DNA sequence: TAAGCAACCTGAGTTCAGTTCAATTTCACG
DNA sequence: CGTGAAATTGAACTGAACTCAGGTTGCTTA
């Protein structure tokens, strides 16, 4: 499975696109998108602000790209983790566990995604931004469908009680991603514990 | 119970503060904070942009005020709804139901609150903004404590299995508020149905 | 009725981050 | 090498948030 990577191998050898994305993820993830000056990202990469526009049409275009890449990664990881399972409950557990099996950079990307989700609602004026936005929206729907179909499969197999799979899927997904709002690696509770707690919650919610 | 209201009776008779808040809730709630020009709010109220600064130190100060008022309302409503219940499961059910017993304006306020939650993380430069931010943060913690203590009460009474009440509380709260990201009054599913679905999920998560 | 005055309002101008423009420099590749 | 697309730049522009230096309104008190 070719994972969506920040550093795209198709770029020219002197391209700084990857470096910009990495720097932007760090700054947007730590201080927030609005709190981060676009020029700070340039400073961190070691180029003038103007050079940023060689790679991204705008600050928002960079943000939307980060969000799209993260959504792609989430979707890919979901598919990878659940494709081998056959028992619905185990499939559900695997989906939850994989959602929390993330690196620190990916945590920042999730945080950025969650904090700026509402950006995907309204159309963008410029072409490339709008392309990224539409792609991101479709990926959001794809991730929602990942969960919905997993639940529907379990219901039709009789492993889960029949409920509105779409609403239930959104509730499960909402609970999982809400963690990225407050979780910090420096916090008192390790991520593994949170993952186990949520896994149990999801199973009780869905399978009982 | 004196509910936190947008229109404060302590204001002068010609004050437009309430009107500004109402207009801002509508615009920020429909198009988003960043997408809304501060001058549009002035237009809607029927005053020049400069007049806004008589009531709010900045656009962000207005936003923080809206968020603080909504948090105050949520907290008050939680307390009001749960104070009469004695059975833990019924108390839990009442708390969930009251979270979804909201007007359309309150839905917009919840949406604004959720979309801009990360604003509460970093200090503000100006004094009045910072005051509102700190007050809002404290209210967030108070709402989290509302849920945590409800869960702990149920656990110590033996009505809920013993789990980490704080993490569980955040998970429950996260699932509930995540609804305001996607719910629209014009959508296919009525809010009452969503409320029932979430209520069932929360009870299974907590009490089983 | 009118003075006094605080609340309320305004047009003109400032600031600043994001962005555009019109070039110039760099370096991978033939 | 030498060529040209990729990469970079300083200076100028833009637009929305905000400041300033007053002006207006209408309530209060005499």
Image (cartoon, coloured by chain):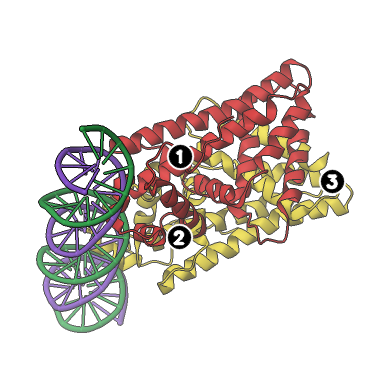
Chain colours: A yellow, B red, C purple, D green
Cα–Cα gap, marks 1 and 3: 49 Å
Q: Which residue is mark 2?
A: A64
Residue A83 shows up from this direction: no
- The numbered mark, 2 or 3, whose residue comes first in the sequence reads 2
**Residue drawn at 63 percent across, 61 percent down:** A141
| Corner quadrant of residue A59 | bottom left
> Disc 1 vs disc 2: Cβ atoms closer than 8 Å?
no
Chain under disc 3: A
Cα–Cα gap, marks 1 and 2: 39 Å
Q: Position of residue B32 (x, y in %)?
A: 47, 56
Which element is circle 1 on? loop
Query: Could you classify mark 2 by the number of other residues whose Cα lies within 10 Å: few (under 14), some (14-19), or many (20 or more)?
Result: many
Residue B58 is labelled as none
**Residue drawn at 85 percent across, 50 percent down:** A162
- The foreground one among B90 and B79 is B79
Q: Nearer the viewer, mark 1 or mark 3?
A: 1
Chain under disc 2: A
In the rendered image, the quadrant that contains the N terminus of chain B is top right
Q: Which residue is mark 1?
A: B8
- The foreground one among B199 and A91 is B199
Query: Could you classify mark 1 by the number of other residues whose Cα lies within 10 Å: few (under 14), some (14-19), or many (20 or more)?
Result: few
Q: Position of residue B68 (x, y in %)?
A: 46, 38
Are the residues flagged by discs 1 and 2 from a single subunit?
A: no
Are the residues flagged by discs 2 and 3 from a single subunit?
A: yes
Give the left or right position of residue A78, taking residue B4 as reference: right
Residue sitting at the far right: A158
Q: Which residue is mark 3?
A: A160
Q: Position of residue B173 (x, y in %)?
A: 62, 36
Q: Is residue A163 above or below residue D11?
A: above
**Residue drawn at 41 percent across, 51 percent down:** B20
Residue B6 shows up from this direction: yes
| Corner quadrant of residue B152 | top right
């Amino acid at each position: 499975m070719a994972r969506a990577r920040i550093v795209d191998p198709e770029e020219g050898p002197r391209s700084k696109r990857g470096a910009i994305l990495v720097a932007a993820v760090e700054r947007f993830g730590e201080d927030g998108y609005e709190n981060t000056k676009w020029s700070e990202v340039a400073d961190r990469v070691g180029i003038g602000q103007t050079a940023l526009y060689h790679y991204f049409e705008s600050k928002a275009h960079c943000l939307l790209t980060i969000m799209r890449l993260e959504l792609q990664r989430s979707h890919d990881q979901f598919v990878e983790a659940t494709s081998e399972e056959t028992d619905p409950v185990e499939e559900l557990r695997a989906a939850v566990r994989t959602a929390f099996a993330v690196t620190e950079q990916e945590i920042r990307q999730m945080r950025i995604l969650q904090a700026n989700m509402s950006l995907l609602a309204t159309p963008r004026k410029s072409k490339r931004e709008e392309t990224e936005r539409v792609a991101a929206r479709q990926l959001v729907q794809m991730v929602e469908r990942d969960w919905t179909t997993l639940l529907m499969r379990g219901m039709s197999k009789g492993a889960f009680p029949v409920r509105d799979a779409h609403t239930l899927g959104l509730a499960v997904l909402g609970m999982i991603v809400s963690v990225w709002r407050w979780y910090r690696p420096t916090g008192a509770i390790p991520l593994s514990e949170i993952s186990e707690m949520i896994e149990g919650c999801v199973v009780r919610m869905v399978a009982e």
